[in-house]
Image (cartoon, grey):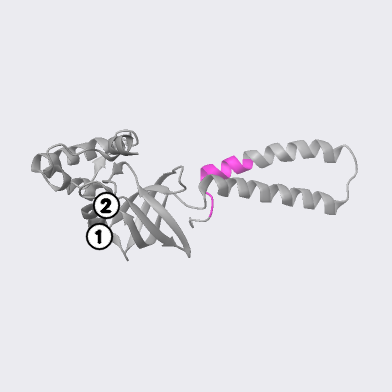
Amino acid sequence: MPPFFCNYNDLEKMSRTVDRCVEGWRKTLCSRSWPLGFVFWVLSALLVLGCEICLANTNGYDDVFSADVVKVIDGDTLEVRHQGRKLRVRLFGIDAPEWQQDFSRQAKEFTRQRVEGQRVELRSKEWDKYGRLVAVVHIGGHSLNEELLREGLAWVHIYYCKEPICRKWRRLEKEAGVAKRGLWKQDTPVPPWEWKQNYK
């Protein structure tokens, strides 16, 4: 299904919304005679309203779609282009070091070399409060989220990674720690969510 059409669940929501609206208007319209043109206008307006509700719920994107990476913002944030539209993407479930933290530049450079200018597959999860699409990013059959963890350039986010895959990701994080890769070369690396509490 093209990314700017609604998925099945959204169509069901739209249908229920339109049904409720139509039922209310049916009682009003059937209580007296109305010109056919007026009835057509009302039904068209209801259909447009339902589609707007559907697009508002999906932001116009499917759960899985491809896009071109045009810019790497930091280790866990990308800017992509899809069908002429630019979109910020936050990698799901992980947290790379903040700008002022050690290994932030290494994390950004790793992500840049891996995906900048490349076509990636996005598996969307949700939209965050900053208007970014939160997603798992795949390239060449591999998950960028996992690669950052494996290289010791990100943490599994303790607050936002609650899905079954997160158990595997925690094992990758632990393995990187044991091998002292990336940020784990430090004695006591501080996760970004703790760092922000202390320095903001």
Outermost residue on the left side: it is 179
Which residue is the extreme one toward the right? 33
Q: Is residue 9 magenta?
A: yes
In this rendered view, identify the residue nearer to me: 23 or 199.
199
Where residue 133 sits: x, y (%)? 42, 49
Q: In this view of the protein, which residue sits in the foreground, 49 or 72?
A: 72
* Disc 1 packing (10 Å; few <14; some 14–19; many ≥20): few
Where is residue 2 shown, x and y percent of the image?
49, 57
Tell me the residue that label 1 is attached to: 114
Q: Residue 91: x and y, percent?
A: 33, 48
Image coords of residue 95 (percent x, y): 29, 43
Element at badge 2?
A: helix
Local packing at callout 2 (Cα closer than 10 Å; few below 14, some 14-19, many 20+) is many
Numbered disc 1: secondary structure: helix
Q: Cβ–Cβ below 8 Å for labels 2 and 1?
A: yes
**Picture layout, residue 47 above or below residue 86:** above
Residue 22 among magenta residues = no
> In the displayed structure, does residue 125 sit left or right of residue 147?
right
- Hey, which quadrant is residue 17 in on the image? top right
The quarter of the rendered structure image containing the C terminus is top left
Mark nearer the N terminus (2 vs 1):
1
Q: Which residues are magenta?
A: 5-15
Q: Main secondary structure of the magenta part?
A: helix
Which residue in the protein does label 2 denote? Answer: 144
Q: How many marks?
A: 2
